[in-house]
Amino acid sequence: DQQVKQNSPSLSVQEGRISILNCDYTNSMFDYFLWYKKYPAEGPTFLISISSIKDKNEDGRFTVFLNKSAKHLSLHIVPSQPGDSAVYFCAAMRGSQGNLIFGKGTKLSVKP
Amino acid sequence: GAGVSQSPSNKVTEKGKDVELRCDPISGHTALYWYRQSLGQGLEFLIYFQGNSAPDKSGLPSDRFSAERTGGSVSTLTIQRTQQEDSAVYLCASSLAGTARYTFGSGTRLTVV
């Protein structure tokens, strides 16, 4: 029973264009959401997060949008750069304690 | 240390043997997590330690898996009688209490042959 779903295993975009990565969740009790980025042979690294009291959080080229009614969040990368090529994991948790629940990841390829 | 350190980075073992995987978290991080990533899968939660509290073992897939955390710092994940389906990358992460911003290690790639 997957509580966090990333339905697109891969995404390819042209350098300079927008990348949009999507994530859906089923547990309405989740109140904190994060995106992690993973390069091959490395551990995931924290990218950006959003609390359920907000619907948008922006950090440089990265923006996360949260639609609570649809239980959907998305990560926008503008403009996309070849160095953004990695696997992106969506994660969610309930409260401030406990473990993150991760999606299966989306592999982003940004072509020069 | 500066980051989360895991050892070994790679481990090949024969089916039926026991293995131990080690994790050195960031100093001062009271929370420690073990996840694994099997081929084509996401990050699967295994176990979570928070301070002196009893660990959350709800993600351990079978009783062949166990973990301990000594002195609130180093953690060891033990897999007994390894099976081929245990082959995966085992990732350790640590964080400050009350935050979801984990710092992950580079993982241990376990291959059971």
Image (cartoon, coloured by chain):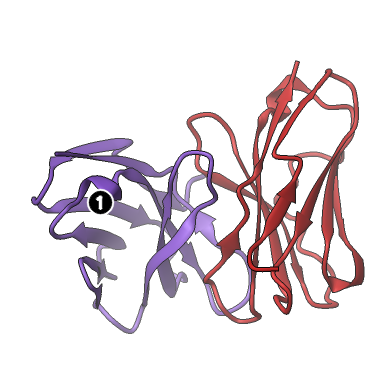
Asked if residue B42 is positioned above or below residue A58 in the image, the reply reads: above
Residue at 47%, 39% in the rendered image: A40
Residue B5 screen position, x and y as percent: 70, 56
Furthest residue toward top = B113
Residue at 76%, 55% in the rendered image: B23
Q: Nearer the viewer, residue B106 or A4?
A: B106
**Which colour denotes chain B?**
red
**Which colour denotes chain A?**
purple
Asked if residue B10 is positioned above or below residue A39 in the image, the reply reads: above
Residue at 84%, 18% in the rendered image: B14
Residue A43 screen position, x and y as percent: 54, 50
Residue B58 screen position, x and y as percent: 73, 55
Asked if residue A7 is positioned above or below residue B110 in the image, the reply reads: below
Identify the residue under disc 1.
A21
User: What residue type is disc 1 on?
Assistant: Leu
On-image quarter of the N terminus of chain B: bottom right
Residue at disc 1, secondary structure: strand
Left or right: where does residue A62 sit relative to residue B10? left
Furthest residue toward front = B2
Judging from the image, mark 1 belongs to the subunit labelled A
Left or right: where does residue B17 sit relative to residue B99? right
The picture quadrant where one finds residue B93 is bottom right
Left or right: where does residue B51 sit relative to residue A53? right
